[in-house]
Amino acid sequence: MTATSSCGFPDVITAFRYPIRHFRESLVTRRKTRVVALGSSSTSGTNDIVAFPARLEQKLRKEKANFGCVIDVLNRGIGGQEAPEELSRIESDVIAEQPSLVIWQVGTNAVYRYQTSNLDEVETALRNGLGWLARLPIDVIVMDLQYTAAMVDPPERLARAWDMQRRIEEVTSAAGVNLFRRWDLMKGWCDAGIPLRAMDDGHDDGLHMSECATATVSAVLAKAIMASPAPPA
């Protein structure tokens, strides 16, 4: 029998490929550990649903391994933005905060605005941003698209979603950066029998994640961070 979360979604463990070295070191050597969440409305929050940064902060603070260490997750999301706009504020909103970990949520708006957006620009901005961050003592996790009704219909948008997923995969792999596969996670819930409409909050045309989807994504992300492989000795 498959375990489920409090919302009824299958309880999934997501493993990261690379160690989260600087975050782990900060937990040991600093009284305060800072995480910055960069992105668009999935990060900033929308329609009165508490977004993942606040939920992630709460879950990380509850970890017994972090007793005595305060973890702050700073929300630097701005609704409607995409990687090029986020890149333009990465110095002021991310680097200036001196985080040990950055979670960069990208790709959704480029696909949602499929008639006018440019995936090449998003890919280039992501690659450049990861290059800048790689020179600093900061771990990075890239969070990809959400799997909601607005992202799978019409067919042209779904095709662009898969293209965007491929691009994000290639860029993060080349950069040696962990990818939090939100798209695969949520699609897996649907494949397991959770209705697609349970993924969104019922507003607009089904773009933004529901309360349950947001809560469970946050829980899976927190588990993945704390279970990340230890750096090599």
Image (cartoon, rainbow, N blue to C red):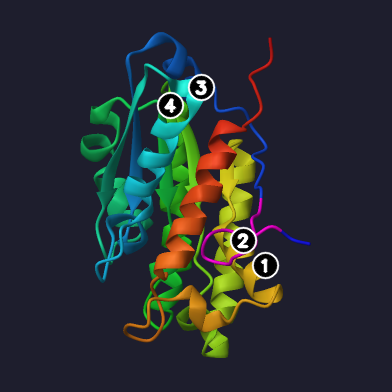
Q: Which is nearer the N-term, disc 3 or disc 1?
A: 3
Q: Secondary structure at mark 2?
A: helix
- Which mark, residue 138? 4
- Which mark, residue 185? 2
**Label 1 sits on what residue type?**
Gly
Q: Which is nearer the N-term, disc 4 or disc 2?
A: 4
Q: Is residue 120 above or below residue 222?
A: below
Q: Which is nearer the N-term, disc 4 or disc 3?
A: 3
- Which mark, residue 188? 1
Q: Badge 2 local density, few (<14 within 10 Å), some, or many (20+)?
A: many
Residue sitting at x 39%, y 32%: 61
Say whether marks 2 and 1 touch (CB < 8 Å): yes
The boundaries of the magenta stretch are 3-12
* Residue 163 placement (x, y as % from top left): 60, 69
Query: 84 or 67: which is nearer to us?
Result: 67
**Label 2 sits on what residue type?**
Leu
In-image side of 74 versus 180 (left or right): left
Q: Nearer the viewer, mark 4 or mark 3?
A: 3
Q: Secondary structure at mark 1?
A: helix
